[in-house]
Amino acid sequence: MKKAILENTGHGSLGNKIFNILRDRILNEEYAKGQKLNEVALSKELEISRTPIREALKQLELEGLVRSEPNKGVFVIGFSHRDINDMLEIRYVLEALAVELAIERINSVQLDKIKEAYLAMEEASKVRDQDKFNDANIAFHESIYKGTQSQYFEQLLRDINYYIHVTSRHSIKQPNRLDSAAIEHREIYEAILAGDKKRAVEKVKKHIRKTQFLVKHYYESKDH
Amino acid sequence: MKKAILENTGHGSLGNKIFNILRDRILNEEYAKGQKLNEVALSKELEISRTPIREALKQLELEGLVRSEPNKGVFVIGFSHRDINDMLEIRYVLEALAVELAIERINSVQLDKIKEAYLAMEEASKVRDQDKFNDANIAFHESIYKGTQSQYFEQLLRDINYYIHVTSRHSIKQPNRLDSAAIEHREIYEAILAGDKKRAVEKVKKHIRKTQFLVKHYYESKDH
DNA sequence: TACCTCCTAATTGTATACAATTATAGTATA
DNA sequence: TATACTATAATTGTATACAATTAGGAGGTA
């Protein structure tokens, strides 16, 4: 019964599945800030042993979503609007760097995937399919990360992007945003294809700043 | 007998100690690239159970130093000179961003620690104490990271900095580098103290670029 | 009441046992 | 010889048992 929760959740070991579940819970603020994540309670709830739970908690700790106090337990750190904004600032500089490296190093397969993702975004934009658009959006950026041919870079940006995406996905759900976002991605793709670093960096920066502005605006309007 | 290896190695749980040991081994290239890290072999060598070993391997995986194949094991990824340079590029943009944020947010305690670290560097430079200089250097930068008041930022930059420090520490061991490095840090500190973002960013960038140049030069001369 | 001490229960840390998967080697077959 | 199959060993994944540490409360004392 309860195990259904595990079935549609990522692939790989139980630990990874639990990690995905807990990460989403934290990013969706289902746990209060500072709340302790009890191992046996979680293992009972999810009907598995403590071992995969501990694996997942370790992973969350390294992602910076919980902090672990020796012999005491792990506690939810949570995040503020400022944290989200900081993440976007980090993403701003790193995406710009990534696209520069990608232009130098990307191969044709990865380039095709960018194009594919961009076309999917354009299509999703036309039919107003937010979910499809989001998936294509993620695929677009991850293809750029892969293009850097840097394992570390790829992983780093994927994590940051996921964090931002989950925490601020509501703020981007604006129907008329899809069209402009599609255009922005097209511009980025074309600059990469042309091997024009300067233009690519400029377009990426413009895109991230726009996203940042929307997120910020969303939270400010929510606070008042 | 063998347990002596664990005694001077970090604090906290066994898993963390093992993590530190294995990370240093990988960064010091004591394991060949692609080599498999066998859990029972490691647990026998270090005379502990598999549990802390697995913890450490998980941590290494998230740091991007090993990759894990389901039901097969974890394998050393290793790193190239290009990886080190990529790290320095990432550090270049992130340190610049960090110092900007730090100027906005830093408190007096953290500011004092920067000053303290800078003075220690100057002293170490005078007496040509490389180890003391390195420690102070790390403390200096980590105080800036803390000044951002961003848990995530702090952790991210600490990891990157450690990676760079361990992999390229030989290249920076140049006695006459100490003096100029001390001056560079002094300039950074003074700019932070004055709250001059523009100048601080400029000085940080100059400092990282210089480090990057030395590391690059070192590896290029080693290759030929 | 306030504070200390001790005891017990709860919780985390580590070791071991068991299950599931994968690698290896040997044999049979074409 | 080369290939496919099978049995066995080795290895990882998960569960459970045990050890060490911490939290919380009962009871005593000033």
Image (tube, coloured by chain):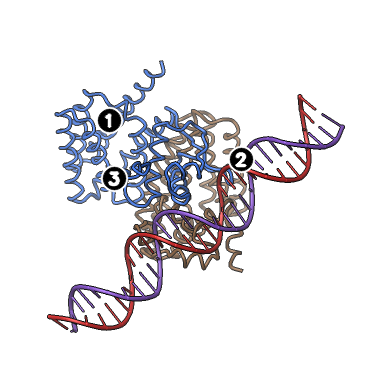
Chain colours: A blue, B brown, C red, D purple
Please say if the residues under marks 1 and 2 sit with CB atoms less than 8 Å apart: no
Residue A194 image-quadrant placement:
top left
Q: Are marks 3 and 2 on the same chain?
A: no
**Numbered circles on residues, count:** 3
Quadrant of the rendering where the C terminus of chain B is positioned: bottom left
Residue at image position (60%, 50%) is B124
Side (left or right) of B96 relative to A105: right
Mark 3, other Cα within 10 Å: few <14 / some 14–19 / many ≥20: many
Lateral position of residue C21 relative to residue A126, left or right:
right
Quadrant of image for the N terminus of chain B: bottom right
Q: Secondary structure at mark 1?
A: helix
Q: Which residue is mark 3?
A: A145
On what subunit does the disc labeled 3 rest? Answer: A
User: Which circle, 3 or 2, is nearer the viewer?
Assistant: 3
Question: Where residue C7 appears, x then y in whole percent?
Answer: 72, 45
- Judging by the rendered image, the residue that carries numbered circle 1 is A206
Which element type, helix, strand or loop, lies under badge 2?
Answer: helix
**Residue B74 in view:** no
Q: Is residue A108 above or below residue A197?
A: below
The residue tagged 2 is B116
The circle drawn on residue B26 is none
What amino acid does circle 3 point to? Tyr
Is there a contact, CB below 8 Å, between mark 3 and mark 2? no
Give me the residue at 23% from left, 25% from top: A177
In space, the residues marked 3 and 2 are separated at their CA atoms by 39 Å
Crowding around mark 2 (Cα neighbors within 10 Å: few <14, some 14 to 19, many 20+) is: some
Image coordinates for residue A66, horizontal then vertical, percent: 48, 40
Q: Is residue A191 visible?
A: yes
What's the distance in space between the residues labelled 1 and 2, CA to CA?
40 Å
